[in-house]
Amino acid sequence: MATQTLTLETRRASLSDASSMSRLSMQLGYDSTELTMRQRMIRVRDDVAHAVFVAALEGDEVVGWVHVTLRNTLWSEPFAEIVGLVVDTNHRRLGVGRALVERVVAWSEAMHVQDLRARAQEHREDALAFYEGLGFELYKEQQVYRRVFEPAADPGGMPTLVD
């Protein structure tokens, strides 16, 4: 059986990619529309601590995307974290995910961090094997808690810290 070779370009995502990115997100079961994807992209596009890249075939067909963020915490040195990575089901195991992670590594190096992390849900066995195959090591296991609440009616801007 011949191995398929793709001609890929990895580039910064643009708002015109929102429809494709939304479609890819739905393949993993995430509730996403073009409008919500555009709104989320607008929220992070001018923040230097975030980067979103897409993998596109010739003809600009988007077949994968990755979102990485720089994490500055009080408990560790800064690190980069992949907070979203999706590859089209018809283009998996063809180097798309690897190309996106390589782009993230280059971004992380440019941000002067030496630690790249990724989270994957336990039931996504393909994702776990993917990251391990790229040299990621299991760092820790943890539970993630959340609390959902209604935002204030008129938040009046972001709160400020007071000495």
Image (cartoon, rainbow, N blue to C red):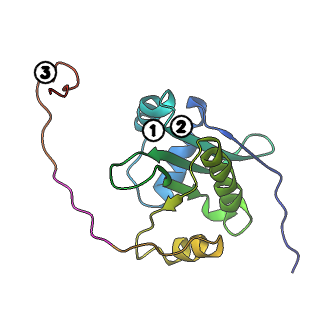
Q: Quadrant of residue 144?
A: bottom left
Looking at the rendered structure, the kind of residue marked 3 is Asp
Q: Which residue is mark 2?
A: 18
- Residue 27, label in figure: none
Along the viewing direction, whichever of 106 and 121 lies nearer the viewer: 106
Magenta range is 142-147
Name the residue rendered at 43%, 41% in the picture: 33
- Residue 37, label in figure: 1
**Where's residue 85, x and y in %?**
54, 56
In terms of sequence position, does the residue under pointer 1 or pointer 2 come before the other?
2
Looking at the rendered structure, the kind of residue marked 2 is Ala
- Residue 154, label in figure: 3
Between circles 3 and 1, the one closer to the viewer is 3
Outermost residue toward the bottom in this view: 1
**Number of numbered markers:** 3
Q: SS class of the residue under badge 3?
A: loop
User: Cα distance, mark 1 to mark 2?
Assistant: 6 Å
In terms of sequence position, does the residue under pointer 3 or pointer 1 come before the other?
1
Q: SS class of the residue under badge 1?
A: helix
User: Is residue 63 visible in this depiction of the protein?
Assistant: no
**Where's residue 102, x and y in %?**
69, 55
Q: Is residue 86 magenta?
A: no
